[in-house]
Image: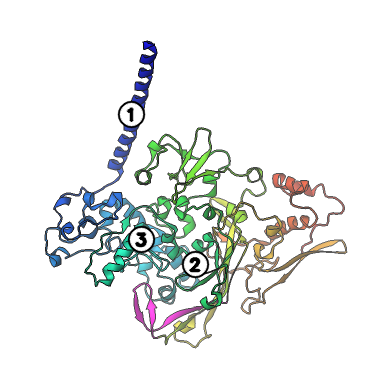
Amino acid sequence: MRSKKAKTWFVLIIFIGITLLFFLRNRQHEQMILEKETEYSKIESVTKESCLQCHQNTKGYSAYHNPEFIGCASCHLGNTASTDKDESHKGMVLIPGNLSDASKTCGKCHPNELHKIENSLMTTNSGIVAIDKYVFGEADSPNYQYHIQQIQNSASDKHLRDLCANCHLGAQKNEFGPITQLSRGGGCNACHLNYSEEAKKELNTYLESNKKELPEFHPATNIFVKNEHCFGCHSRSSRISTNYEGWQETMLDESEVVNKDGFRVLEDKRVYKYIEEDLHHTKGMLCVDCHSSHEVMGDGKQYTHEEQAVKLQCADCHFKEKPNTIPYDSLDAESLLVFLHRDYKHTDKQIIAVEKDKHPLVNTFIDSLGKAFLIGKKDGKIHELKPQSQVCSRDNAHKNVSCSTCHSSWTSRCIGCHNEFDKDEPRAFDLLDKKYGKGQWKEFVAEFSSSLPAMGVRENSEGKYIEPAVPGMILTIDKGSYAGKDLGEDVSFHRLYAPNSPHTTVKEVRDCKSCHTNSATLGYGKGDLDYEIKNGKGVWIFTPEYAKNTYDNLPEDAWIPFLKQTKKGIVNSTRTDFRPFMVKEQQQLLLVGACLQCHSEDSKVMQQSLIDGINPLLKKLNKSCILPTWN
């Protein structure tokens, strides 16, 4: 009996010892990484700061930004040696975190992160500036590098200042309060500022008392980024945030949708109608569940366009055979900090790493059975990450088709945009310099709508891929109006589609006909695309829904002419490596579309074409099969 008890105690002691060693090893790893790769300032004399003599018993701080540990001056600066109100507040930063002072505040403890942010696209807006200058004819390529805060006052620069320059991280946050739909910029605040309900209430009391009744609750600065932090800027332009939540912009006025179901009025009074939300949103997932700090803050390199900066792909989580992984003890300092702040426990499990640049998704892990899981950053819910379906894995005919091309249920469409300069506008507001002046670019939109995404071809050194495309820049620009000429004297017309990641992901893929027999998908615009057989010959006929534009004689919403080569020299994309289908590619797609007129997509022959391609099957044609002829 004694020997059994002794053996039990021995095993228990060994187990405790191994557990303790594992814990100490992890803590040692954490300490080593943090000391090696971060440059946190040593904050001395925190208890000697005079701030807390007036600001007593304040609450609401995040665990890692509590003044008991870092003081007040590390964020707010000021003179901490004086107890006099005016003297102690000299040099104080009321709203720390703006990029204008981040090197003295946030950047003192987080220099690596600040370096990344200062070079990120959310700060430089390089792609927005590059394309605007390209479209205005002020640059011969959309691939030059720019910074929004360095633009001057050319026609395109003024256009940006009047209509676009609000959404960049360098924009100052000058007013107290939480991040809202109307928030723009604010540097580190844009993502990391969080007001509790108590902090909001205390702020209102403070302001109503003419700033005499000091708040007891302080807003928190932490890593708990919510979708609200993204919404202000990303509900504009390609409207990723609104798409993700299922809302499509309309031309309606607020008064037209009062008490109507299925509509939503944003804080800026834009009216949206509900279409269908992204599958990940229905599961409660946040933007940062997929787009981690490595993407949101950037990697320190300067990029021109967002697709260059975004490394994450659907296949990283929904892998084909097995995921790319990294062990916990190989995490970089930034990832380790996120892991610790979120109090994750999966130190003994492999973590998914993005294939393109190997950055880890610390809210993922692989269990002992090889199954992958994601921990939702909103609620801690565990989501199983399903591998690619068998159809996607064995489909050889669509290997170069992006996941979002098939799995996006809709995307926004915007056509008929006209831009002209009103030299007499008395209260023109410069979004960059935040001041009023005279003369302003104005934009007039003909229509907002939605549809299945069109398709385009990304062709570069990495390969050739089919991706979603959106008609976002079918527009006229009255350049003469800015140069002082009469309206309409010097107008340029542009028919540009842009690569687009709709963020309207659904489980069920679009059907075959929606690609192979859909006119809008192929780039012809909305309308009727019919396959007619006459006298033993098959011919595709397209009847557009929209009238033809007087500038180029194409339907208003089209990207390319129907089965005709685009005229040489015509620029029709916002990217130099993204284009519409060439005539031969259109014919190949419509050839399959002709087969689908008789053969259902789940028929044996069409399913076989997914594996072998269409060409081997063309050698076994039935006499009743009539393929299209091309003029």
Type of amino acid under label 2: Ser
Q: Could you say which quadrant of the image residue 348 lies in?
A: top left
Type of amino acid under label 1: Leu
Q: Which residues are magenta?
A: 426-447
Label placed on residue 20: 1
The first of marks 3 and 2 along the sequence is: 3
Please state the horizontal and vertical placement of residue 520, each as a whole percent of the image.
66, 65
The first of marks 3 and 1 along the sequence is: 1
Could you tell me which quadrant the N terminus lies in?
A: top left
Q: Residues within 10 Å of mark 2 (few under 14, many from 20)?
A: few
Residue matched to label 2: 237
Q: Nearer the viewer, mark 3 or mark 1?
A: 3
Please state the horizontal and vertical placement of residue 359, each as a whole percent of the image.
43, 45
Choose between 138 and 275: the one closer to the eye. Answer: 275
Choose between 245 and 609: the one closer to the eye. Answer: 245
**Residue furthest front in the image:** 1
Residue matched to label 3: 197
Above or below: residue 265 compared with residue 38 = below
Q: Is residue 368 left or right of residue 392?
A: left
Q: Nearer the viewer, mark 2 or mark 1?
A: 1
Type of amino acid under label 3: Glu
Q: Residues within 10 Å of mark 1 (few under 14, many from 20)?
A: few
Distance from the alpha carbon under mark 3 to that under mark 1:
40 Å
Please state the horizontal and vertical placement of residue 316, each as a whole percent of the image.
52, 45
